[in-house]
Image (tube, rainbow, N blue to C red):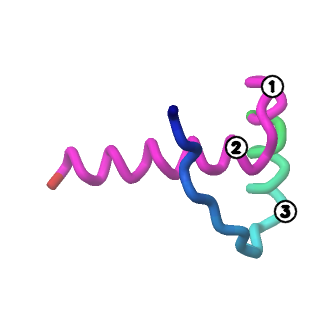
Amino acid sequence: MKMKPLKTKISITLDDPVLDQIKELADLEDRSLSSYINLVLKAHLETLDREK
């Protein structure tokens, strides 16, 4: 049986223009804001790992 990854709720503060743009992009991919931010952060971390 496949288990879901552990998740932790946090609170962050974003600049309004950044939030507006992220909301638009999440909508375009039919994702929740949280899901989209998680996806973008994972991709960024993978890029950093490859650059090491």
- Asked if residue 3 is positioned above or below residue 30 in the image, the reply reads below
- Foreground: 27 or 32? 32
Identify residue for label 1: 30
| Crowd tier of the residue under label 1, counting other residues whose Cα lies within 10 Å: few below 14, some 14–19, many 20 or above | few
- Asked if residue 44 is positioned above or below residue 28 in the image, the reply reads below
Q: Between disc 2 and disc 1, whose residue precedes? A: 1
Amino acid on which the number 3 mark rests in the picture: Asp
Q: Between disc 3 and disc 2, whose residue precedes? A: 3
Q: Most extreme residue toward the front, as rendered?
A: 1
Task: Kindly report the distance in space between the C-alpha atoms of the residues bearing marks 3 and 1.
Answer: 21 Å
- Asked if residue 29 is positioned above or below residue 13 in the image, the reply reads above
Q: Which mark is residue 16?
A: 3
The residue located at (34%, 45%) in the rendering is 46
Position of 21 compared to 42: left or right?
A: right
**Can you tell which of label 3 and label 2 is closer to the viewer?**
2
Residue 43 is covered by the magenta coloring:
yes
- Foreground: 35 or 15? 35
- Measured as percent of width and height from the top left, residue 5 is found at 54, 50
Residue 11 is covered by the magenta coloring:
no
Magenta residues span 26-51
- Foreground: 44 or 5? 5
